[in-house]
Image (spheres, rainbow, N blue to C red):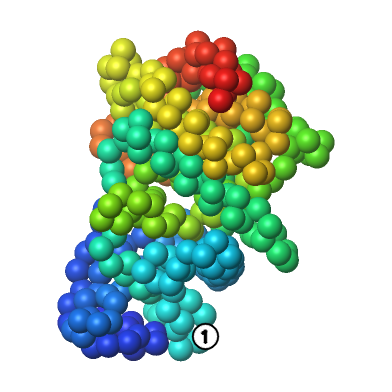
Amino acid sequence: MNNRWRTILSNFELEGTPVEISRLGNGLINDTYRLRIIEPDLPDYVVQRINSNVFKDVDKMQRNIDRVTAHIRGKMFDRGIPGGPERLLTFVKSSTGKSYYEINGEFWRISKYIDRSRSREEVTPELAYITGKSFADFQYMLSDLDGEPLEETIPNFHNIEFRIRQLREAVGENKVGRLKQVRPLVEELLDRAEEMSLAERLGREGKLIKRITHCDTKVNNLLFDEDDNVLCVIDLDTTMPGYVLSDYGDFIRTAGNTGAEDDKNLDNVGLDMEIFKAFTKGYLEGAKPFITDIERELLPFGAKLLTYMQTVRFLTDYLNGDTYYKINYPEHNYDRTLAQKRLLDSLDAHEEEMKEFIASV
């Protein structure tokens, strides 16, 4: 282990003797490593360099995470479930007393490695059901978090009115001369702007509640034990106030797609109703203690909203010259836009079927 790692680790209150550090996982935002400890009776650690270009206020983000993990630990205690580092994210204090440390402009944090845990990447109806129930329960456990509301770690992250304004600005600037090619698509999306801003309007009217949401509801953001029981929800960086439509809709957008997010063959793209039904059943079971009638009614709209939002974001980035999303070839964001638009069309076509299923659960 080199001096750089020794310097970083020396600022945290670690137990045991570090012997090896190696890459962990394939995250796209933060750099993550596993730190092995020589003593067999002590846990290993997960070391992360936080991407401060994405999370511009690390202190705010970590305060949110500290409050969330402490509250969930209390809830698990109330349920008679052990809530130690063997099944919950547990962050190590740094020499400043905070759960992160800044050194040379880089932000680092360390949590205890959850032994014998594993993540899953594939999406099956069974796993979709488990994921829906787990994320709904995550929202439920945080529904009575005391004190000030959590802060937005990425302002306006799922605010569709903000995303539409960004698209309008990109159209007006036409920085790289791509507008002519996509003008019909731009017009079609902007024609739906008022329709898709429904959640924000209902929020301002006090009819739709902002809860604590995860904002990245994927199967691989759950940890499972060796018997495939869910241990905990992970990747809490984007946990912040939001509508339940965001967490519900984003899973349907990503996992409920029969094709790839950037599929060039649009015939591959559409709504997988089996995944939709399994996730929805699990989500409604987990959300039963808190979900309101209007939230339940708007779940199909949530799936459309998050898909529409991602279509808008890909198209905005394409018009701006591909400055936000990493691309593998020049027309990558355009292909992503078309694939998301095709999924949106499929969701429109299945809307009544989705509503009927939700009414039947």
Q: Is residue 76 left or right of residue 39?
A: right
Three-letter code for the amino acid on which mark 1 is drawn: Gly
Q: Count the marks: how many?
A: 1
| Closest to the observer, 250 or 201 | 250
Residue with the most extreme front position: 80
> 66 above or below 255?
below
> 360 above or below 157?
above
Q: Which residue does the image show at 30% across and 56% down from the upper left?
A: 225
- Secondary structure beneath disc 1? loop
- Dot 1 crowding, Cα within 10 Å, few <14, some 14–19, many 20+: few
Q: In which quarter of the image is the N terminus?
A: bottom left
| Closest to the observer, 266 or 41 | 41
Q: In this view, does 124 lie to the left or right of 181?
A: left
Spot occupied by residue 337 in the image (x, y as percentages of width and height): 41, 25
Q: In this view, does 222 lie to the left or right of 184?
A: left
Q: Is residue 279 visible?
A: yes
Spot occupied by residue 25 in the image (x, y as percentages of width and height): 26, 56
Q: Which residue does the image show at 67% across and 21% down from the upper left?
A: 195
Q: Quadrant of the C terminus?
A: top right
Spot occupied by residue 61 in the image (x, y as percentages of width and height): 54, 64
Spot occupied by residue 344 in the image (x, y as percentages of width and height): 48, 20
Q: In this view, does 352 lie to the left or right of 35?
A: right
Q: Name the residue under label 1.
A: 97
| Closest to the observer, 108 or 239 | 239
Q: Can residue 315 be seen in this view?
A: no
Q: Which residue does the image show at 50% across and 87% down from the upper left?
A: 96
**What is the quadrant of residue 78 in the picture?**
bottom right
Q: Which residue does the image show at 31% across and 33% down from the upper left?
A: 124
| Closest to the observer, 126 or 103 | 126
Residue with the most extreme right position: 205
